[in-house]
Amino acid sequence: MKRFNISHVYDFDISGKGVYSAKSETLSQICSFLNPVRYKVQTEVNAKSEIKLSSAYVLYWYLTDIATRITALCESGKDTEKALEAFSLESRRMFNFSDFSKIVKEHGLVPISAMPDAAHHHKGEATYVFDNRLRLGIKQICEDGISAQEVLDDIDSILTDGLGDLPESFDFTYIRTDDELITVSTLTPADFFDKYCKTDLDGYKTVRTSVDGVKETIAKQIKDGEQVVILADTRHQANQMLGILDTDFTDNTDVFGKAYSLSKDEKLRLGIIRPSAYLSLDGVSFDENGNVLRFKAQDTNGSDTGADGHYTMSAKWFDEYALSAIVNKKYL
């Protein structure tokens, strides 16, 4: 193991109150996109108390959208194998910013109090039953003459039982930093997003981290008080206990007794580096010359991982294992 010296202190730190504790890959991916938005809500209302947004609400619409598209494919083609293959591809891919943006534009967002996450964060029954019911539904639509709507009605019942009832309207309660308790009544999900989330989803773009100046672009966004979601391969040179992502943490120059040297592009081509997780960058430090030295990266696996749910990510680790970033276009 190499020696290393990495600090958990940052020149700019905009991490919000509390961290998500997602118990599945899809929920973890959803929570990573919710992190920057919930921080905007906290800032907008000057909240003293922790504010989280409901990942169950986003998951409901994500799975419903998949079911709608797959059942429509069944009705149009009556091809069981083709539909099963399409669903398998959907099941394996990562939730992404396009999914998030589509859901929020159509359905808004809700605070966790309006549709609690707790039950599903600790149980996988809803997505497990959803998967099996849709696979059976593919067979029923293509081969047995069952209508797509009958399958979708069953799936809606499964998701409602497992994730909770969709709120048409709700009250939003929070505590301000002056200790005043505020309650805003009868908000719809669209109202909540428009009034408190302050995010123009069309104003963002996914950029590859190989683009020149991307670290500096991310740093500008963080300095202006806005978190940045990145896609990375967190399986490499990471210490969960200490909360460190650093290429100097372990010596990877020798594998199975044989020295090797591969470029990042070669590692990507061979699958040695591949997408594994999203992280929300919410802090940055610079060296004496103004170059990015390290980022603060928020995990979605609870406060027991890393340093209270955060990792210190060296600039070298970012260069090697970060794959893309979702940045505000005004910083490009």
Image: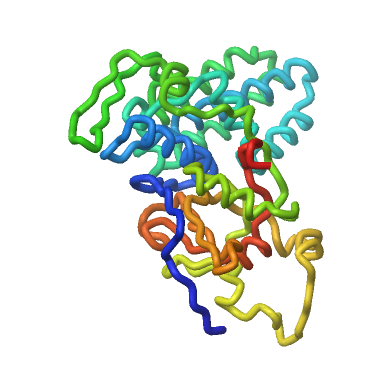
Q: Vertically, is 57 above or below 318?
A: above
- Residue nearest the observer in this picture, 92 or 149: 92
Which residue is pictured at 36% across the width and 55% down the height? 303
Q: Vertically, is 145 above or below 260?
A: above
Left or right side of 3 for 39: left
- Residue nearest the observer in this picture, 134 or 220: 220
Q: What colouring method underlies this structural image?
A: rainbow
Q: Can residue 170 be seen in this snapshot? A: yes
Q: Can residue 136 be seen in this snapshot? A: no
Residue 110 in the image: state x and y as whole percent: 41, 26
Image quarter of the N terminus: bottom right
Image quarter of the C terminus: top right
Which residue is pictured at 63% across the width and 67% down the height? 316
Left or right side of 59 for 46: left
Residue 166 in the image: state x and y as whole percent: 42, 20
Residue 72 in the image: state x and y as whole percent: 70, 18
Q: Residue furthest bottom?
A: 257
Q: How many marks?
A: 0
Q: Vertically, is 24 above or below 271?
A: above
Which residue is pictured at 30% across the width and 23% down the height? 172
Left or right side of 63 for 56: left
Which residue is pictured at 44% across the width and 61% down the height? 10
